[in-house]
Image (tube, rainbow, N blue to C red):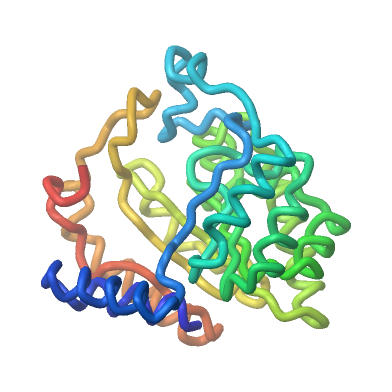
Amino acid sequence: MYIYKLLHLNRVIKNHRLKFLGLYILHKLNMRYLAVNLDPVMACNFRCKMCYFTDPDYVRTLKGQLKDEELERIAEVIFKRAIKLQIGCGTEPTLYKNLVRIVELGKAYKVPYISLTTNANLLDEEQITALIKAGLNEFTISLHGVNKASYEAFMKNGSYEKFHEVFNIFKKLKRDHNFKVRINYTFNKDNFYELDTFFEHFDGQSFDILQIRPIQKIGNTEYNDFNLEPLREDYSKLIKGIRENCKTNGITLLASDEIPDTSKIN
């Protein structure tokens, strides 16, 4: 997956002057270098405890969605420079009625990699198939709990059964279609240890990439315990077991070998 190799290269190169030089060269050569993050609608159907959508004052400031002509203009001006199009980065894109059109525009402007970030609860087989046929390369699925109790506690308004129904659809469609599924698992000290049973709940044939990332302070959220120090001693051992399961199932694991210092997270 070229986009992930490029992201890795960006982390490896620490010198900002070298990075800007690379961007300048790409621009002069009329090549693609933008990672475009697009929220087509300012709303979400969930109220996840680790998300700013649990802050009612913040939610009141969010309103509106892209008009058709606005979407077309954004695509015309920006997509020709995009190496990746990320649909959904802070809200829930499946609430947007013309979601498939965004993917179609991305492919029309030859964006190499198009990804959709979603909580998955509004997806069904018809819409998933339409997105894949339009050219979507990857579904990135947010997850805050491995078991039903934890999932529905942290991801308010979510249905654990509906979530797994979508992953069953992914597994089915993977037989005939080429697309990736990535799970982004955000952990805190109350949902970390259940990761040990992850592959008892999730079929390794239904997804391709697993990212395990620590909780971050992203606003006035309902859940606000950011102290991960109690997990530090057990973290490496648990991640090692997950890494072995991922290798067995041919899954790419994106996770640090140890918990970063708090100052580097928040």
Q: Is residue 79 visible?
A: yes
Q: Is residue 201 visible?
A: no
Q: Nearer the viewer, residue 38 or 186?
A: 38
Q: Is residue 211 above or below residue 251?
A: above
Q: Is residue 110 above or below residue 259?
A: below
For image coordinates 53% across by 33% down, the residue present is: 153
For image coordinates 62% across by 62% down, the residue present is: 139
For image coordinates 51% across by 79% down, the residue present is: 251
Would residue 68 appear left or right of 91 to someone viewing this image?
Answer: right
Q: Quadrant of the C terminus?
A: top left
Residue most toward the front? 28
Would residue 24 appear left or right of 207 to someone viewing this image?
Answer: left
Q: How many marks?
A: 0
Q: x, y (%) of residue 63?
A: 58, 22
Quadrant in the rendering for residue 55: top left
Q: x, y (%) of residue 84?
A: 51, 67
Would residue 5 appear left or right of 173 to someone viewing this image?
Answer: left
Q: Nearer the viewer, residue 130 or 23?
A: 23
For image coordinates 70% across by 35% down, the residue present is: 67
Q: x, y (%) of residue 203?
A: 64, 70
Q: x, y (%) of residue 154?
A: 50, 35
